[in-house]
Amino acid sequence: MKVEFGAFDGGMVGKVPPAYLESHVVSETDRLTDVILCQPLHLTPVPCCAVTREALASGFTTDAAEALRQHNMLVEALERHGVRCHSLVPSPDLPDMCFTRDIGVATPWGMTALNPAMPHRRGEVDALLETCAEWNMPVRQITRGTIEGGDVCVAREGLLIVGQSGERSCAAGAEEFAAPFRAAGWDVLLCPFHADHLHLDTIFCMVEKDEAIGCLELLDPTFVEALYERGIKVIPMPTALSSSLGCNILSLGGRRILTSATDAVVTSALRKAGYAVDEIDISQFAACGGGIHCLTQPLRRIPA
């Protein structure tokens, strides 16, 4: 069904973008061609979630040079797999700006700028909007309720998943984001979870159109049952991976996955299931509450 994206709440900004900067995603596991990143030049742990509070309590401080090295390794891995990397300009006032996933989501109808719950992250949305304007890329902006990209999973064509902790993404934000999907006849699954787990992508991520990894004990049983009813198998992961960001992986499409080098259990399970896995050291970012999924905002995916 054709949907007029601009008819929904949240104004459209920009013009028709160049073809190579098209914002278009219909599946979390289609082949990734373009991604939005931001160098961690000002990365600092902000005590706004359980992971960063624990890291700070243990004496963690960021190592700027090491964070940049790790981020460069992520970029190299993406480019090695043929992914074009596009960058936002880092700002000293935005310590979490490298976690680009949370501020925008590419949909079947273009880019949506989100509305983070944390006040210190709202400037990141402004930076995304400014960058998209420079790229002549149209953007729909969420204006009611709060929603962050770590809670959004454009699982596959026809199925949208949105996590709701009530702290980062609320019901109003989830519904405003989901409106065009519902209008196009998509199935929308909502997954409630405890706010201690920050975002849905710390306990659940798609790896193929009919398969995911997840901390089953931390996922709502009704949500898990709904996944199985739709033919999606969940490879079970230990609950401890929620705090280590081990489930926070990135599908490149074609059964290729980027995972954290510190969580061998995920790598082992995925390789056993027939996936090609590249491991990346993201320890500096994990201590600040983000993993590989958080560090990457897919801009364009195409069917394998």
Image (tube, rainbow, N blue to C red):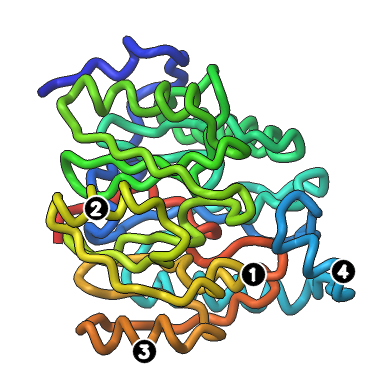
- How far across and down, in percent of the image, does residue 146 sit? 57, 29
**Residue ID at (46%, 15%):** 10
Residue at image mark 1: 286
User: In which quadrant of the rendered image does the C terminus lie?
Assistant: bottom left
The numbered mark, 1 or 3, whose residue comes first in the sequence reads 3
The label number, if any, that marks residue 57 in the structure image: 4
Frontmost of labels 3 and 2 is 2
The label number, if any, that marks residue 268 in the structure image: 3
The Cα–Cα distance between marks 1 and 4, rounded to whole angstroms, is 15 Å
**Residue ID at (40%, 33%):** 111
Residue type marked 2 = Glu
The numbered mark, 2 or 1, whose residue comes first in the sequence reads 2
- Compared across the picture, whether 187 is left or right of 150 comes to left
The numbered mark, 2 or 4, whose residue comes first in the sequence reads 4
Residue type marked 4 = Ala
- How far across and down, in percent of the image, does residue 88 sit? 59, 47
Q: How many marks?
A: 4
Query: Which image quarter: residue 130?
Result: top right
- Mark 4 Cα within 10 Å, few/some/many (few <14, many 20+)? few
Residue type marked 3 = Ser
From this view, report whether residue 113 is shown above or below residue 263.
Answer: above
Frontmost of labels 1 and 4 is 4
Residue type marked 1 = Ala
The Cα–Cα distance between marks 3 and 2, rounded to whole angstroms, is 25 Å
The Cα–Cα distance between marks 1 and 3, rounded to whole angstroms, is 20 Å
Query: Which image quarter: residue 224?
Result: bottom left
- Compared across the picture, whether 276 is left or right of 53 comes to left
